[in-house]
Image (cartoon, coloured by chain):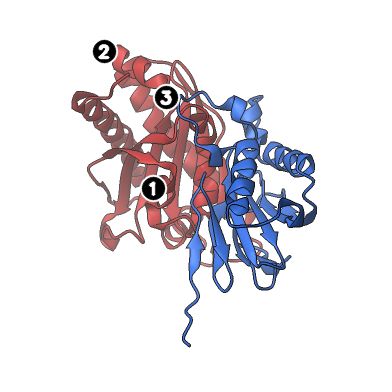
Chain colours: A red, B blue
Amino acid sequence: MKITSLHLDILKEIGNIGAAHAATSLSNLLGRKIDMRVPNVNMVSFTEMMELAGGSETVVVGIYLRIEGDVEGSMFFILPIGQANRFIKRLIHDETFDFSNNPVSELGLSATQELGNILSGSYLSALSDFTRLKLYPTVPGLAVDMFGAIISSGLVEISQVSDHVIVINTSIFEDDYGDSEEVQGHFFLLPDPESFETIFKALGVV
Amino acid sequence: MISSKQVVKVGIAQLDIVKSPDTIRTSGLGSCVGVVLYDETKRIAGLVHVMLPDSSLGKTSTLNVAKFADTGIEALINKLKSEGVQPFRLKAKIAGGAQMFQFTTDKDTMRIGPRNVEAVKLELKKYGIPLVAEDTGGNSGRTIEFNPDTSKLNIRTVNQGVCDI
């Protein structure tokens, strides 16, 4: 199918609704003001995808889950290490927590997993309410590693049918720290190619 | 004479070749496998960043050969041949094929790392190219850089630091 500018607007709205709900959840969890950027929807090559969020070698905290149901796809929540440290320190009330520690505290990792669970859950349930489609997220996996290594896990399905990926990218940030790349958290929603038609149909656009 | 060393960068699902004194590098390998083929005497090497095991998995009309283990290795051998390399002189070093996330799903694509490694080894065997060294599997991302001068493959991971194979 051909993606028109109307389609792109719909995908932006999806990113908007999803991330707004996730930002609210995060704000409630932390008791802090969380802001979000206007969503980006782009068709990018795999190489370009790897260069998002600071580049393929940048070490990040990545939460990844697969979406099953009416729509299939991959979803990532990516946080720069410094910002992830701030969030988790506040969540577990432990100022010594640091993803650079070796080993990283189990409690912190478990809190990160739960944070990912809650945020992706609010993103996807908002999306499900909006489209009235059934979305079943898998339990999220957590990795602290190079961005490229993390994100390529979500490209496997897509790479079988395409050399490009449509990525719905929304970033959120803590008000007090500004919105530079170093502190932005990113939601990347990567629907599998055959799922786009389902999304558009559900919203009355073909 | 002033010679400046260049680093040839290879992106995901891409391939390229390099001659001494330049080096060749690919970053952020997760489940993907970086395959280096090199000729020690001519000091020429090629690198392909493989994403998927088999081109029969591809459902696109246009085939990006560098994406798959089978077509990628074949294309890399041909590219090296066109530089005057004798295929029987080629040796291989490989890295990658990690499983970045542990999932409880029956989808075969979640095991893509190990499958990529198996497919690469099968192809190398098919062309009679000896596999000299490998750093595969595990659950860490890798950045690799090959120096055709020393035939060393430098591997960097986040938790285990740097090593040469």
Q: CA distance from mark 1 to mark 2?
A: 28 Å
Identity of the residue drawn at 45% across and 35% down: A75
Q: Is B49 or A154 nearer to us in this picture?
A: B49
Q: CA distance from mark 3 to mark 1?
A: 18 Å
Q: Secondary structure at mark 1?
A: helix
1 and 2 marks in contact (CB < 8 Å):
no
The disc placed on residue A206 is 2
- Residue B31, image quadrant: top right
The disc placed on residue A193 is 3
Identity of the residue drawn at 72% across and 56% down: B93
Mark 3: which amino acid? Pro
Q: Is residue A26 left or right of residue B155?
A: left
Q: Secondary structure at mark 3?
A: loop
x then y, percent, for residue A35: 26, 48
Q: Is B23 or A42 nearer to us in this picture?
A: B23
3 and 1 marks in contact (CB < 8 Å):
no
Q: Which chain contains the residue that carries disc 1?
A: A
Q: Secondary structure at mark 2?
A: loop
Give above or below for A93 relative to B115.
Answer: below
Q: Residues within 10 Å of mark 2 (few under 14, many from 20)?
A: some
| Mark 3 or 1, nearer chain start | 1
Mark 2: which amino acid? Val
